[in-house]
Image (cartoon, helix red, strand yellow):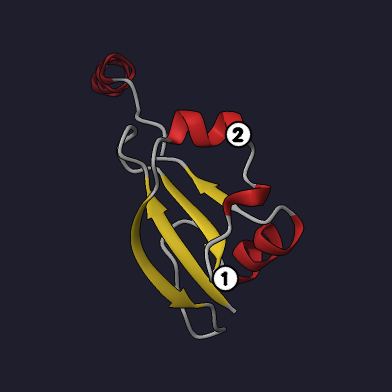
Amino acid sequence: MLCAIFRSPRRADTYLYVPHPADFAKVPEPLLETFGTPKHVMTIALTKERRLARISVAELIQHLEQSGYYLQLPPPQESLLDIHKKQQQESK
């Protein structure tokens, strides 16, 4: 299966995966409005050997077959205040 990957011009580290050739018909309109005009990053072949950073190839294929798209959001950022509090607790 070929997969086209697009980045959001509005949200950093936010990517939209769709089956190739790219068809955004199954992507909800409110999501596309928030995402902005998709900017093509690359097209990849989804094979067992391929490794992806945040999702397995099997999970991605499942999303693409069921929903017609997969939205990758940036990982949540840990609060600097929480990090500081944790360090304070550990130093006691």
Point 47% across, 66% down: residue: 4
Rendered view: 29 above or below 4: above
Residue 22 spot, x, y in % from top left: 52, 63
Residue at image mark 1: 57
The answer to whether mark 2 and mark 1 are in CB contact below 8 A is: no
- Against 59, residue 71 (above or below) is above
Q: Nearer the viewer, residue 19 or 91?
A: 19
Disc 2 or 1, which lies upstream in sequence? Answer: 2
Q: Is residue 72 above or below residue 4?
A: above
Q: Position of residue 15 (x, y in %)?
A: 42, 49
Q: Amino acid at mark 2?
A: Glu
- Give me the C-alpha separation between circle 2 and circle 1: 26 Å
Disc 2 secondary structure class: helix
How many labels were placed on the picture? Answer: 2
Q: In the structure shown, which secondary structural element does the residue marked by tag 1 occupy?
A: helix
Instruction: Give the position of the N terminus as an image quadrant.
Output: bottom right
**Who's the residue at 65% across and 61% down the image?**
64
Q: Where is residue 82 drawn, in percent x and y?
A: 34, 17
Q: Which mark is residue 70?
A: none
Residue under label 2? 29
